[in-house]
Amino acid sequence: MPAAPGSLKGRVALVAGGTRGAGRGIAVQLGAAGATVYVSGRSTAGRRSEYDRPETVEETADLVTAAGGQGIPVVCDHLERDQVEALVGRIDAEQGRLDVLVNDVWGGERLFEWDAPVWEHDLDNGLRLLRLAVETHAVTNHIALPLLLRTPGGGGLVVEMTDGTDEYNRANYRVSFFYDLAKSSVLRMAFALGHELGPRGATAVALTPGWLRSEMMLEAFGVAEENWREACERVPHFAISETPSYVGRAVAALAADPHVARWNGQSLSSGQLAREYGFTDLDGSRPDAWRYLVEVQDPGHPADTTGYR
């Protein structure tokens, strides 16, 4: 199954926070559609970030190139304005355009505490989470959007990556005060950007994957992608999970859509866009995790993905 209808050859993308997880999946699928993809992050072959994970921006860039695009790794801390300015300046000098900006910087897995009220949550960790999850996106938008807006032909796309749809997050408490605030802030960021970019010919959306089989998630369950279903024995609802390539194909489909402006300012999910554009996950399935959560998991029904993937 192709990544998305249409080709992105000649288009330039920046995936901010593309080292692993959804960011890596998005970068690779943009590459599979022919795009030149700048992959930024803090984890490099020479030095790990505070995550202390083995994945690097160089690896992601190599995967982009192997998929058919051109992957360009750039080590960048998106909290540091001078580093983001240097990154965007390099894209301008080398390409003269920026068609797609994906804001996927996160960095909070080890910083939030499940169901801990704000007065019991570690304050330093909570504030660090907000900086990584929200401030990085604001800094990157401030510096990169002028280049995106002057791209020849216009029609640039900004994708704000989050966890949860606007509808779901408004109705449900998400993990902790700080996690909830971070993910809801990014949703609102896409809404605000839609108002600012739409009249100028560009489009902004918020996008969430479902239950993502990221490197860290697979590791937490003690499985690999090849045997991920074994984790369903312990957590049956994990059966609705999806690969990072699935949300990657969603971004590639949006970027190739000449009528993408119809989504401006909206909150979208990988499952929703799979129905719209006709792409599948790597195994040929089409998981719809957020509908499944509302209709099956949250009401406490037995795990059954029939009709949901």
Image (cartoon, rainbow, N blue to C red):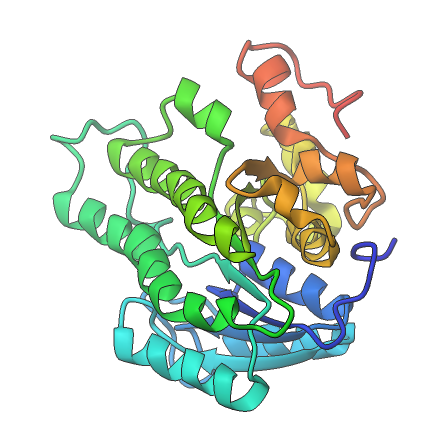
Residue 300 picture location, percent across and down: 56, 10
The residue at the far right in this view is 1
Residue at x 38% of width, y 49% of height: 109
Task: Indicate whether 289 appears above or below 199.
Answer: above
Q: Is residue 91 visible from the viewing direction of this image? A: yes
Left or right, 131 with reference to 272: left
Task: Indicate whether 297 appears above or below 290.
Answer: above
Residue 45 picture location, percent across and down: 47, 83
Residue at x 38% of width, y 45% of height: 189
Residue 266 picture location, percent across and down: 54, 37
Q: Residue 122, located in which quarter of the rendered image? A: top left
Residue 157 or residue 15, whichever sits in front? 157
Residue 87 picture location, percent across and down: 42, 80
Q: Residue 192, located in which quarter of the rendered image? A: top left
Left or right, 175 with reference to 260: left
Task: Indicate whether 236 appears above or below 248.
Answer: above
Residue at x 25% of width, y 32% of height: 177
Residue 240 or residue 289, whichever sits in front? 289
Which quadrant holds the C terminus? Answer: top right
